[in-house]
Image (spheres, grey):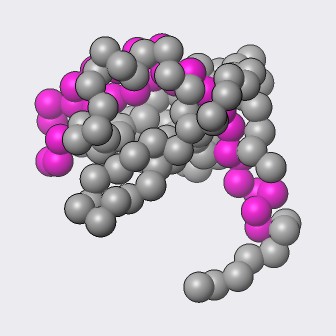
Amino acid sequence: MNTISWQDFERLALRAGTVIKAEIFPEARKPAYQLTVDFGPEVGVRKSSVQITVHYKLEELVGRQVLGVVNFPPKRIGPFLSECLVCGFYREDGSVVLAVPDKPVPNGAKLG
């Protein structure tokens, strides 16, 4: 495992946000959703493509808080422009479980 400096970690903008919209991403090569996440007034609303269909249904995502990296450059995924990386953990079967705050925090709260 490579080590990083504290300054490297501080360069990541890891923020809490609330999912305000979740849709199926029909053009994705692997089953995925398109999420719209409110990261608070400083960051704003961002969109992300997420491959979390194994463990989550669309209707349970809206209103859920997530953790996201908000300072990556946008990435085109087919016809969709992903504006942040919603974080999760890979399980042994390759499925993804969301990384989330265990108690409510303000949208835009920094992980530190």
**Where's residue 87, x and y in %?**
51, 47
Give the farthest residue toward the right: 7
**Where's residue 98, x and y in %?**
45, 42
User: Which residue appears at 67% of the width and 28% of the height?
Assistant: 103
Q: In this rendering, is residue 66 above or below 92?
A: above
User: Which residue appears at 71% of the width and 54% of the height?
Assistant: 12
User: Which residue appears at 46% of the width and 29% of the height?
Assistant: 47
Q: Is residue 85 visible?
A: no
Left or right: 90 with respect to 68?
A: left
User: Which residue appears at 53% of the width and 44% of the height?
Assistant: 99
Q: In this rendering, is residue 37 above or below 7?
A: above
- Residue 57 shown in magenta: no
Give the farthest residue toward the bottom: 1
Foreground residue, 107 or 60? 60
Q: Is residue 78 visible?
A: yes
Magenta range:
8-37
Which quarter of the rendered picture does the N terminus lie within?
bottom right
Foreground residue, 109 or 41? 109
Left or right: 15 with respect to 31?
A: right
Foreground residue, 99 or 21? 99
**Where's residue 111, x and y in %?**
74, 45
**Where's residue 77, x and y in %?**
30, 44
